[in-house]
């Protein structure tokens, strides 16, 4: 998952490089942080928690839901961590900055809110025994140290939700056992997902409160320098086909050629990384969103799995107008396969 | 000699080329007499009258009134001359619109320091203005306005009355009445009259007639 | 056809460039004055908003501790319960060169993070990393020589003496680890949150503290706005005059155009387009002028507000689109207003009417009467509105009715006065002069109205500002009767301080108060100890005879004027502070600058009814010359304990400086408004020039020299100015009365006594004369030098 990388990184880099460079600021190497290591196997529950020696990290949940009213809903809950420097001391001098994003998308509306907090005082953070991620009163919690059963809550002026999720499949490690390469030069992150959640719960909007159910996808990723200097942003797709198969694919956009990669997850949960370039995505239609032209419809092709599908947004205006803005919303899949998914696009300044 | 105009010339330089308006004009007028100056439009009649009234300056020659030469006279002295010795009646009447008939009648005399209420009252009566004294100029007829103008001019008991087409704006009947009154009052006041007109009928009522053509006396 | 017709209409202005100039300049100046004031006001407001957003003084509620400080864990617990709060650490930072006020904020939650996203102020990220401290350039020297400081960023957006930094740095510098001074309650519309009173029973919610100084600043801006509005009105008189003349003089043309088949509506549309064009052009010029003017005045305004109010206005002006639009809007609106009458008469104009000559004094008489009746109607309507309704708008309605009504009454008054003068005149010439002046009245009355309004505005605003100053300074001397005020943080410090003072023989009066809510209004109840300080100095407005005895035996209470007016309680009435706490109002005192209700009871009464009233503030009485030494000792002995001591002489001196600055600004606006009026006279004289000659020529022919006529023109202008000034005086005083006794009461809840300043009136008369002379000088000069031939043309046969 991706966007987030950019976002959080740019917060960290901001003071150093100035705002003009925006997302491109991710391409700067900062010393003092740990770097992803291919030989480092992921350990759980330890790696469900925070890695304060890495610059950026996130717990990123999206869900495609259907209400008892028959309508489509998309829900996002994200906790970002961005470190100004490595380490996690107690008190105000803590260099960890936490940022929460929450969104609810319907075919007609898109609501979002954000929260900011500093580490070290308990306002935001992630604990592993049992697993809890929180910022203010937004929480993602588990009764135990696994991610198998989660409860997520968020509330703002225009929406609130309280969802329960249980996983019916294993964790998926992307790339090389969780070591996910992000450029031809080898920039990488640690990246795993739990894409198999069954979700039920209640969603409240200004004018109604509905019971919802559907599927959820949690991404975990951390790194210290995930992008090449010339990479300007990315587009990330998480697709769940009705066949039970799933596909995660991303494009890192660059003047010198895009870098694409992804993971194929078959119905029984077995995951296989895609070779760079195997995952192909081409824009079909654009929308004017907040004065930006953004590709909201896509043609996705994965020859090795005979995938040739069209991706259409539930709401073309799924704009997260947060401190670092981006497009994030639920999509529907048609063509050779059908299904639902989430699309995230960053770097459209 | 009350009025003596000797070899007066006047050129205007405001048009593209200078233009002679009066050329070597000489006229004399004895006290108590009257003269009519006739001529075509543009012949220089009004210019001559303005020069005599010290309203304008001549280029050469000399004009003297009751022995006082206008040549080299200061603006102030020329103004004093108009306040007392010379009075004017214009075709446009030129009453002061902000003042009543009564105020207009006495204005000139008071400016000249020669206010004679009895004389003004005589004039008012003779001019038939008694019922109109409280009116403003725009509230009375043209003939009445010109009678006020004549009264105003004579109220100061000038030695010389200059009249420029005094009946030019009036119809024939009114014109005759006004001329008749003017001649009678000139007689009564003993002033001399220098009258500019293009009408030979009016000119004939005066003692003497002179004719101006293209700036020269015929 | 349209283009040709428009060309024909426009050609009028080519022939009469002076008229066009008058129109454009008049409108431009009106717009400039208005928009300059608007620019200053909006700049100041925007600046306060920034400053208060940065410092947490904004209109946001604040949670303060009952005693001491707030633990960080309390803050976190409230955040985790869903409340959006912003923590602030604040304290005195003692430095070798004096102390500064150190404020530590968390940029991630502080309201500045969203309010300050524009480039002029610092950004969130700048504060977070690398960590640095922000201060005004004037504060910098106090920090010279302090080792190991974070990088310093200088900014004009902070008041002098304040250092702003990240909360982590502030807690180290103040050694306040884990303790917060207050929590700003951010806008929070989420429903279903547990109330703060339940979550944090030991924190006190202090309602938005519209600080005292904020209200005074508002008052200052209200004055400026009134001034801008009045100036605009003055400028509009020029516009009305010239638009009317432009239509009057083109009657012939209109007649011809109509005869050629142009419909009345087409003609009106063309004329309107012409006016819109002129209005936009002039409005544009006015905006530029206004911008420059505001730029020139802003530094003075800025230092005014920076003084006592502590509100800093940045020295540079931002061009706001709303400001541009409102300026152009006002220009259009003003033109519409000023040309409405001319257009109405145009509609009524019969097609074949011979072009009218200038109306005469006596025919204008009925017009004057109609105007006077309308004017009286306006004044009466304003008065009735005042009686029937309440509110600030009504105050302004009264003001508008008074101004416009008086202006409409002016021609009739002037005409009557001139008739009397004419009757009293002895000489022929003076009689003519008065009669002539009366005849000219229709042409110059608009300019006279402008002059009168300008003078009245000056008298009114000047009286108000000066009265304000005298009253306020007097009040400050009474209210701040102690030489030093000290605030401490807890009861322990308090007793320590009292002992310390006792040992030095300094009298200290505790100032103890509790905030209660009565009848839905937050009220501060102060408990006073019997002391001659109160009996001698308290600024009482109304009281029963036994005032202080009543208060100190516990039955009586003093209330401030604001509360008295709001609840309509006056001496003798009963005030219920709670269900079982009733007192009798024994007096009302003035309390300028405070938006809230205040009650003063005896200390024992307060302590009996409200338990646990904190004892944190003290007023110290001591000889003035001992103040500096005691201040120094206080600071040394209580150095690390963060007490706040204020030397009142300092406050008083700063207040005085503020008013002097205010005078500079109002003085500059005064001169400009008079300048506008002077210009109105000039333009009316110049536009009248053509019809003036036929009136003067006969007099000249009767033997009045041109030089004399020129002098008479000057005298005439002086006489008119004098008349306008004499008539403006009562109007100006009435205006001041409305501003002080009605508008101030409506806007701020207090009434100010009015003082008279006759020397100012004489100065104004002098200025009016200067304006009149300057305005008449050019026409007079022209008249003195006119060629006889030009006057003779009047007599020419063919006219």
Image (tube, helix red, strand yellow):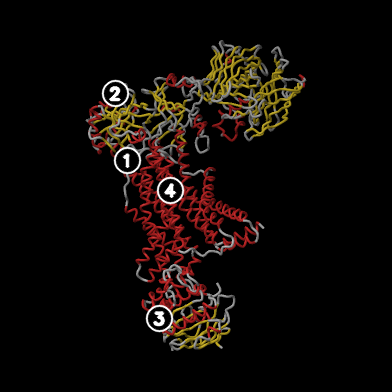
Give the Cα distance between marks 3 and 1: 78 Å
Q: Nearer the viewer, mark 1 or mark 2?
A: 2
Say whether residue A7 is left or right of residue C771.
right
Q: Are marks 3 and 2 in contact (CB under 8 Å)?
A: no
Relative depth, front residue between B143 and A208: B143
Residue to which mark 3 is pinned: B157
Classify the position of the N terminus of chain C by image quarter.
bottom right
Q: Secondary structure at mark 2?
A: helix
Q: Is mark 2 in CB contact (under 8 Å) with mark 4?
A: no
Circles 4 and 1: CB atoms closer than 8 Å: no
Q: Residues within 10 Å of mark 4 (few under 14, many from 20)?
A: many
Q: Earlier in the sequence, mark 4 or mark 1?
A: 4
For mark 2, what is the residue?
Answer: C607
The foreground one among C412 and C746 is C412
* Label 1 Cα neighbours within 10 Å, binned few <14 / some 14-19 / many ≥20: some
As measured in the structure, the alpha-carbon distance from the residue carrying label 2 to the one carrying label 4 is 51 Å
Q: Give whichever of discs 2 and 4 has the lower sequence position.
A: 4
Mark 2 nearby-residue class (10 Å; few <14, some 14–19, many ≥20):
some
Both marks 3 and 1 on one chain: no
Badge nearest the viewer, 3 or 1: 3
Q: Quadrant of residue A16?
A: top right
Label 1 resides on the chain identified as C
* Residue C16 coordinates in the image, percent (x, y): 55, 62
Residue bearing the label numbered 1: C652
Of helix, strand and loop, which one carries label 4? Answer: helix
Check residue C401 in the rendering and tell me which mark sits there, or answer none.
4
């Amino acid at each position: 998952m991706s966007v987030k990388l950019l976002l959080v990184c740019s917060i960290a880099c901001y003071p150093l490089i100035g705002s003009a460079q925006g997302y491109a600021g991710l391409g700067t190497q900062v010393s003092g942080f740990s770097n992803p290591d291919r030989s480092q196997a992921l350990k759980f529950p330890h790696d469900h928690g925070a890695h304060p020696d890495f610059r950026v990290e996130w717990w990123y949940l999206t869900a495609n839901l259907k209400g008892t009213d028959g309508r489509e809903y998309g829900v996002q809950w994200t906790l970002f961590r961005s470190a100004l420097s490595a380490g996690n001391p107690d008190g105000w001098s803590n260099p960890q900055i936490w940022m929460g994003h929450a969104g609810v998308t319907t075919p007609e509306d898109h609501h979002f809110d954000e929260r900011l907090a500093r580490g070290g005082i308990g306002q935001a953070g992630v604990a592993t025994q049992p697993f809890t991620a929180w910022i203010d009163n937004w929480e993602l919690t588990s009764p135990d140290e696994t991610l198998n059963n989660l409860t997520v809550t968020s509330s703002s002026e225009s929406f609130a939700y309280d969802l329960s999720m249980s996983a019916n499949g294993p964790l998926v490690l992307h790339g090389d056992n969780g070591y996910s390469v992000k450029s031809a030069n080898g920039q990488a992150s640690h990246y795993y997902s739990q894409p198999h959640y069954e979700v039920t719960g209640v969603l409240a909007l200004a004018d109604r409160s509905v019971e919802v159910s559907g599927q959820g996808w949690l991404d975990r990723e951390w790194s210290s320098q995930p992008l090449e200097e010339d990479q300007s942003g990315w587009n990330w797709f998480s697709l769940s086909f009705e066949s039970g198969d799933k596909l995660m694919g991303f494009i890192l956009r660059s003047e010198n050629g895009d870098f694409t990669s992804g993971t194929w997850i078959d119905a029984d949960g077995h995951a296989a990384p895609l070779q760079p370039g195997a995952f192909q995505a081409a824009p079909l239609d654009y929308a004017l969103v907040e004065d930006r032209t953004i590709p909201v419809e896509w043609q996705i092709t994965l020859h090795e799995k005979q995938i040739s599908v069209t991706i259409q947004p539930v709401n073309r205006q799924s704009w997260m107008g947060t401190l670092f803005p981006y497009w994030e919303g639920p999509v529907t899949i048609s063509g050779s396969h059908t299904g639902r998914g989430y699309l995230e696009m960053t770097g459209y300044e | 000699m009350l009025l003596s105009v000797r070899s007066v010339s006047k050129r205007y330089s405001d048009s593209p080329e200078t233009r002679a308006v009066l050329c070597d004009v000489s006229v004399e007028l004895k006290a108590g007499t009257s003269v009519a100056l006739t001529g075509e439009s543009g012949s220089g009649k009004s210019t001559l009258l303005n020069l005599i009234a010290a309203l304008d300056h001549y280029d050469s020659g000399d004009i003297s009134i009751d022995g006082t030469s206008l040549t080299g006279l200061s603006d102030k002295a020329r103004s004093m001359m108009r306040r007392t010795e010379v009075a004017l009646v214009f075709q446009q009447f030129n009453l002061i619109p902000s003042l009543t008939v009564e105020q207009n009648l006495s204005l000139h005399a008071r400016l000249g320091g020669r206010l004679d209420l009895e004389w003004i009252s005589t004039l008012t009566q003779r001019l038939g203005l008694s019922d109109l004294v409280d009116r403003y100029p725009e509230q009375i007829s043209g003939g009445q306005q010109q009678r006020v103008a004549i009264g105003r001019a004579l109220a100061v008991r000038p030695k010389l009355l200059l009249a420029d087409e005094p009946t030019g704006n009036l119809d024939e009947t009114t014109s005759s009445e006004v001329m008749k009154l003017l001649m009678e009052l000139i007689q009564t006041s003993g002033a001399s009259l220098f009258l500019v007109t293009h009408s030979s009928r009016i000119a004939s009522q005066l003692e003497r007639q002179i004719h101006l053509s293209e700036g020269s006396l015929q | 056809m349209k283009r040709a017709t428009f060309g024909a209409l426009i050609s009028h202005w080519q022939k009469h460039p002076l008229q066009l100039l008058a129109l454009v300049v008049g409108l431009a100046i009106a717009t400039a004055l208005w928009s300059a004031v608007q620019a200053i006001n909006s700049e100041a407001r925007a600046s306060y908003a920034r400053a208060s957003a940065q410092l947490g003084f904004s209109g946001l509620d604040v949670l303060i501790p009952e005693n001491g400080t707030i633990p960080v864990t309390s803050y976190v617990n409230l955040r985790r319960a869903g409340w959006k709060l912003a923590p602030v650490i604040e304290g005195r930072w003692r430095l070798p060169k004096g102390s500064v006020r150190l404020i530590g904020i968390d940029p991630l939650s502080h309201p500045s993070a969203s309010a300050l996203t524009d480039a002029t102020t610092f950004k969130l990220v700048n504060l977070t990393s690398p960590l640095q401290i922000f201060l005004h350039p004037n504060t910098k020297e106090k920090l010279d020589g302090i080792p190991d400081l974070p990088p310093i960023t200088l900014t004009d957006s902070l008041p002098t003496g304040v250092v702003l930094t990240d909360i982590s740095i502030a807690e180290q510098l103040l050694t306040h680890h884990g303790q917060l001074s207050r929590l700003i309650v951010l806008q929070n519309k989420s429903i279903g949150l547990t109330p703060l009173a339940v979550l944090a029973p030991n924190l006190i919610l202090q309602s938005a503290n519209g600080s005292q100084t904020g209200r005074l600043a508002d008052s200052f801006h209200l004055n400026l706005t009134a001034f801008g509005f009045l100036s605009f009105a003055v400028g509009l008189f020029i516009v009305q005059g010239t638009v009317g003349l432009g239509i009057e003089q083109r009657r012939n043309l209109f007649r011809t155009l109509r005869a050629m088949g142009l419909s009345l509506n087409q003609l009106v549309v063309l004329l309107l387009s012409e006016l819109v064009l002129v209005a936009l052009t002039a409005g544009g010029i006015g905006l530029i002028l206004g911008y420059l003017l505001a730029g020139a005045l802003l530094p003075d305004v800025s230092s005014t507000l920076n003084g006592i109010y502590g509100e800093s206005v940045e020295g540079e002006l931002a061009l706001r689109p709303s400001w541009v639009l409102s300026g152009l809007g006002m220009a259009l609106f003003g033109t519409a207003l000023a040309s409405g009458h001319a257009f109405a008469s145009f509609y009524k104009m019969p097609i074949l009417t011979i072009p009218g000559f200038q109306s005469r004094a006596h025919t204008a008489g009925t017009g004057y009467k109609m105007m006077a009746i309308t004017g009286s109607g306006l004044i009466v309507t304003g008065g009735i509105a005042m009686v029937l309704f309440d509110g600030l708008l009504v105050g302004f309605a009264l003001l508008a009715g008074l101004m416009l009504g008086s202006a409409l009454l002016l021609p009739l008054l002037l005409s009557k006065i001139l008739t009397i003068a004419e009757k009293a005149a002895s000489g022929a010439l003076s009689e003519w002069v008065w009669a002539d002046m009366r005849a000219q009245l229709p042409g110059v009355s608009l300019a006279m109205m402008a002059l009168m309004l300008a003078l009245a505005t000056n008298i009114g605003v000047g009286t108000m500002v000066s009265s304000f100053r005298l009253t306020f300074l007097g009040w400050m001397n009474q209210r701040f009767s102690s030489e030093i005020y000290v605030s401490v943080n807890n009861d322990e410090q308090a007793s320590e301080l009292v002992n310390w003072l006792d040992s030095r023989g300094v009298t200290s009066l505790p100032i103890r108060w509790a905030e209660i809510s009565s009848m839905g209004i937050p009220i501060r109840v102060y408990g006073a100890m019997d002391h001659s300080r109160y009996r001698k100095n308290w600024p009482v407005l109304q009281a029963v005879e036994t005032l202080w005895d009543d208060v100190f035996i516990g039955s009586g209470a003093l209330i401030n004027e604001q509360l008295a007016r709001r609840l309509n309680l006056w001496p003798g009435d009963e005030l219920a502070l709670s269900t079982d706490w009733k007192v009798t109002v024994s007096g009302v005192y003035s309390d300028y600058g405070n938006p809230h209700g205040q009650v003063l009871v005896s200390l024992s009464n307060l302590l009996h009814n409200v338990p646990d009233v904190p004892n944190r503030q003290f007023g110290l009485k001591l000889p003035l010359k001992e103040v500096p030494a005691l201040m120094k000792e206080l600071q040394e002995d209580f150095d690390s304990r963060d007490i706040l001591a204020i030397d009142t002489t300092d406050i008083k001196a700063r207040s005085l400086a503020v008013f002097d600055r205010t005078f500079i600004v109002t003085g500059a606006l005064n001169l400009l408004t008079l300048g506008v009026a002077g210009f109105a006279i000039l333009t009316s004289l110049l536009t009248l020039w053509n019809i003036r000659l036929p009136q003067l020529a006969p007099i000249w022919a009767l033997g009045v020299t041109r030089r004399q006529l020129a002098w008479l023109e000057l005298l005439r202008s002086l006489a008119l100015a004098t008349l306008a000034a004499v008539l403006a005086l009562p109007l100006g005083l009435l205006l001041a009365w409305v501003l002080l006794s009605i508008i101030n009461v409506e806007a701020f809840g207090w009434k100010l006594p009015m003082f008279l300043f006759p020397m100012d009136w004489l100065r104004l008369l002098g200025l009016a004369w200067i304006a009149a002379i300057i305005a008449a000088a050019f026409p007079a000069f022209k008249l003195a030098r006119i060629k006889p031939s030009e006057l003779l043309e009047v007599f020419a046969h063919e006219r």
